[in-house]
Image (cartoon, rainbow, N blue to C red):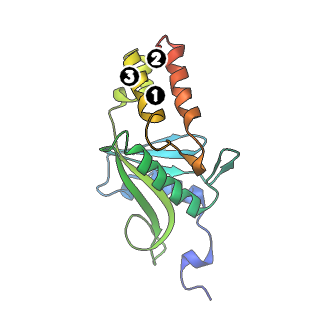
Amino acid sequence: MPSTLSETREFPITEKVAFLRRPEAYAPAPHRVDVVETHMSWVFLADALVYKLKKPVRYEFLDFSTLEARRLNCQREVELNRRLAPDVYRGTVPLTLRSDGSLRLGGPGTTIEWLVEMRRLPADRMLDAAIRSHSVEPADVRALDSIVFNDERPYTILNGAPSRSVVLSILWKASAIGIRA
């Protein structure tokens, strides 16, 4: 007979997301939590910190269908992005199920999910805002290209697939508004 809630059922992703939407899920509790959803993840903006939860999905170009795949991807994301933003990517954090059946971000319990923890950047300093405001210079685009494509190690993301398409997407957005590398 199962001895804990975690052994009796899978914890639905909707309940995980609902928990992470609540300020009391975080220590210290932020004033509010804003949520951004993409096709691959949910991003929880909690005052000074940001937490990214990968969706349990599988596409031709990525596989987040298992807890282990999401853990590995979170670790890779932190490792790779620390090269570009070492003070932003803080690490990975488990979402745990405690013996009393409650959820906790970090701490003891059965790990039921993994998240990337990041320092929150000012909204006006994000790449999409910089592109919209035309504050991205050609030298910035060249520097990004140099860092990503001329590094000694190939810059990879999901399941070893090159992230060139991701960066090319960024460069395409920049070129669409007249920035040329």
| Residue 165 can be seen in this image | yes
Measured Cα–Cα span from mark 3 to mark 2 = 8 Å
Q: Residue at x 51, y 62 (%)?
A: 113
Residue 181: mark: 2
Q: In the image, what residue type sits under mark 2?
A: Ala
Q: Would residue 72 be found to the left or right of residue 47 on screen?
A: right
Q: Residue at x 61, y 78 (%)?
A: 8
Q: Is residue 122 left or right of residue 60?
A: left
Callout 1: helix, strand or loop? helix
Which of the labelled discs sits on residue 119, or is there none?
none
What whole-number distance in Å separates the C-alpha atoms at marks 3 and 1? 9 Å
> What's the distance in space between the residues labelled 1 and 2, CA to CA?
9 Å
Q: Quick one: label 1 or label 2, which is nearer the N terminus?
A: 1
* Residue 142 drawn at (x, y percent): 42, 22
Within the image, what quadrant is residue 126 found in? top left
- Is residue 136 among what the camera can see? no
The three-letter amino acid code for the residue at tag 3 is: Asp
Q: Earlier in the sequence, mark 3 or mark 1?
A: 3
Residue flagged by tag 1: what amino acid is it? Asp
Coordinates of residue 107 in the picture (x, y in percent) = 37, 69
Q: Are marks 1 and 2 in contact (CB under 8 Å)?
A: yes
Task: State the SS at label 3.
Answer: helix
Residue indicated by mark 3: 140
- Badge 3: how crowded within 10 Å, few (<14), some, or many (20+)? few
Q: In which quarter of the view is residue 33 placed?
A: top left
Task: Work out which residue is located at the far bottom of the displayed protein and give it.
Answer: 1
Name the residue that disc number 1 marks: 145
Q: Residue furthest front?
A: 152
**Could you say which is closer to the camera, residue 137 or residue 16?**
137
Q: Estimate how packed mark 1 is, as few (under 14), some (14 to 19) or many (20 or more) residues with alpha carbons within 10 Å.
A: some
Q: Residues within 10 Å of mark 2 (few under 14, many from 20)?
A: some
